[in-house]
Amino acid sequence: MARSRYCDCCILTRARTPSMVSTSPSVLISVVITNYNYGRFLSEAIESVLGQSHADVECLVVDDGSTDESRSVIEKYPAVRAIFKSNSGQAQSLKMGAAAARGEVIVSLDADDYLYPDACSTIAANWAPDLSCLNFRLKVDGQSFESWPVEPFLDSGQGAYLARYGYYPSAPMSGNAFAASYLRALLDRAEHLDGDGVDAYLLYSAPFCGRVSHVDRILGYYRTHGGNVSMTSGRKTVKNIGDHAYYQYWAQQNAARSAAASGAPFPSRDHLMGAYPLLWLLVAKDGGYTRKPLPAQSRWLTTRETLKAFAVQPGIPVWSRIKNIGIVAAMAPLPLGARRKLAQRFILV
């Protein structure tokens, strides 16, 4: 049976026992689940939102033109606000979901992840009007470490850390709550936000548009599987690596714009920062990536910055430092054909 693009709007009203309902502050939290062909995981994501102990939660699912069973899964949940659209990527899906959301706070939940029952009550209890972003941890399966991020959260100085290293410790998309006003404004004005990689854009500009804080607890689950887009767990192809170098570059450039608009000090750079994004850039260019325009920085500059980043950037295990410095140093003097073979080997391991 055909259904309207938007189902009946409703805040979660399913019956709860008194023990399920939290006494956290009355903050309406909108959880926007962005989905593309993750029907096999979607029920768990939706039910994790509908099962929150926090009293004021709305669940929206934006389906980005899925061709699997996603629509039939979504239609099983009348308490969900559903948006069905043609395929255009996560950024546009989140933008549409944010426009429809009514909450003061928005959590963007990837459809292959899920939240713990007290996630929204914990977010509400720690929310403050001056926040642009609240980070929390996600449990990770299939990895040697327990949670994202591996590093300690910063109590302050996220903007300065970003300026120095090209990132600051934070979880992937599902491990963050954003002020709705900030999220909408950033998605409206961000340059080159034309696909995925949305979390980096939102996280890197957040320190210049409000205060960034954290809850040092695991409040959700980050699922790893063969189809992840994330570079932490997914398939590593030339396309995947090149796309992530592109997103990281433009997330950093948008952060510089946000810093300038707020009057915060931030260095003006036309090259990519960060150990792993720089390594991805080298590999993507050697691998013949052409899908999106990568930063036009010289190979010499990229190699120099990559070696320096792996030497000084915090949070990188010693063995990874040694291995990747060795890879970059070995690739540097080689002709393109030999570098391409090394690049393909890097992608497969």
Image: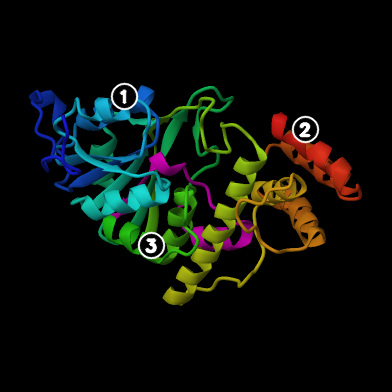
Residue type of the residue flagged with mark 1: Glu
**What is the quadrant of the C terminus in the image?**
top right
The reply, left or right, for residue 25 in relation to residue 256 is left
- What label sits on residue 345 in the rendered view? 2
Question: Which class describes the residues within 10 Å of circle 2: few (<14), some (14-19), or many (20+)?
Answer: few
Q: Residue at x 49, y 71 (%)?
A: 257
Q: Are marks 2 and 3 in contact (CB under 8 Å)?
A: no
**Quick one: SS at disc 1?**
helix
Q: Residue at x 20, y 43 (%)?
A: 5
Question: Can residue 286 be seen by looking at this rendering?
Answer: yes
What is the quadrant of residue 226 in the picture? top right
Chain-order first, disc 2 or disc 3? 3
Q: Is residue 166 above or below residue 319?
A: below
Residue type of the residue flagged with mark 3: Leu
Q: Is residue 245 above or below residue 235?
A: below
Chain-order first, disc 1 or disc 3? 1
Between residues 276 and 164, which one lies in front from this camera angle?
276
Tell me where the magenta segment starts and ends, as one range.
155-179
**Quick one: SS at disc 3?**
helix
Residue 225, image x and y in percent?
51, 25
Pointer 3 residue: 186
**Marks 2 and 1, how far apart in space?**
36 Å
